[in-house]
Image (cartoon, rainbow, N blue to C red):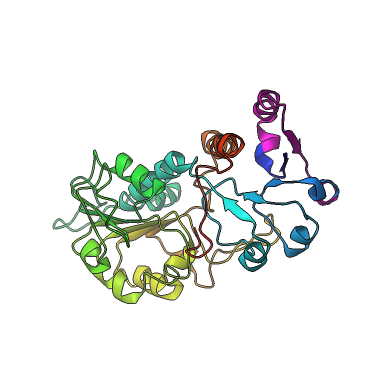
Amino acid sequence: MTVLFHTHLALDFPDRLQAFAEAHPEHRIVSVSGRDRLFAEIAQADVLVDHRISEELLDAAPRLKWIFVPFTGVNALPWDPIRSRGIRVSNNHGNAEVVAERAMALALAAAGRVAEFDRGLRQGRWFRNPGRERPFELWKSLRGARTAILGCGALGRAVARFAGPLVGEVVGYRRRLDRGVPEGFHRVTDSMAEALDGAALCFITLPLTPDTEGLIGAEELRSLAGAILVNVSRGAVVDEEALYQALATGSLAGAGLDAWYRYPKPFHAPTHPSRFPFHVLDNVVLSPHAGSHAPEGKRGQLEGTLENLVQLFDTGVPRDIADPDSGY
């Protein structure tokens, strides 16, 4: 079997990939960078490790049976030709712990007004009021906060483990209730209204699928009045305009956002992340979709990929398989 790596992860951890190749000499493990090398090798590939897949690339890959996306999100794949070719897709959750850590950092920063106070003090502002009735501008503690986690997959469960020691009741939202209540959750519901009712903190960890696109709209955001919202999944799960209005009017107390609506092309081009001016709002902590961008997160993505490849070599089927019908 020929496994073709076209991902920065192979370049970031070359020693790990070499050790993996040496441990599996019966398979050909190839790492390439650049379009020319990719197209020169793709015709021989049975497995492609990549996330930037074009129809042109698929047409040049007659032997391809598997695409391994080295992280969770698979919504950007060209699913129609993948289905028609019978190619299967594997993803993994190797970065879940690191992204959950980032989610908790965003929650604490938004509730604690950390970025806002930092910006103010750099200009000499101390966030004090002259009146005796309210001499200090206050930040929001999350101790005991009722917390909703929308999505109970690997990332949602990791967020629950991080948040649990600080917050109060943790309520999960998922469509299927036959999988029980995961560790770290007090209860799980398939009712969005029930999950959001009374929540002071809400994490979004859902994948982007046709069913979840725009799932959180104006009505759901009104249910979160006074709460902190953290999105570390995909921007389009939350209605863009409704989110901006909820933050601009102060209906939402604050937000930590690592998932967006507009991305630069190319990535070094300065680009605001939305058609709405989130960047001028003081109650938003902005993060450039960097939840996994720690060495531990990137290594976790690679290790998750390699674990799935071992399963494929040993059994013919990897541990994690993306469902084209559900989109994750």
Q: Nearer the viewer, residue 274 or 20?
A: 20
* Residue depicted at 31% across the width and 52% down the height: 111
Determine which quarter of the picture holds residue 133. Answer: bottom left
Q: Is residue 227 left or right of residue 75?
A: left
Q: Looking at this view, name the residue that lies furthest to the front.
A: 315
* Res 90 visible: yes
31 magenta-colored: yes
Q: Is residue 230 left or right of residue 328?
A: left
Q: Nearer the viewer, residue 199 or 106?
A: 199
Q: Locate the N terminus and report the quarter of the image it occupies.
A: top right
Q: Is residue 180 left or right of residue 310?
A: left
Q: Is residue 162 left or right of residue 115?
A: left
Residue 257 position, x and y percent, is: 44, 57
Residue 88 drawn above or below residue 208:
above
* Residue depicted at 44% across the width and 43% down the height: 96
Residue 161 position, x and y percent, is: 31, 40
* Residue depicted at 15% across the width and 55% down the height: 132
Determine which quarter of the picture holds residue 27. Answer: top right
Residue range corresponding to the magenta coloring: 10-39
Q: Nearer the viewer, residue 229 or 192?
A: 192
Residue 266 position, x and y percent, is: 71, 59
Residue 121 drawn above or below residue 282:
above
* Res 224 visible: no
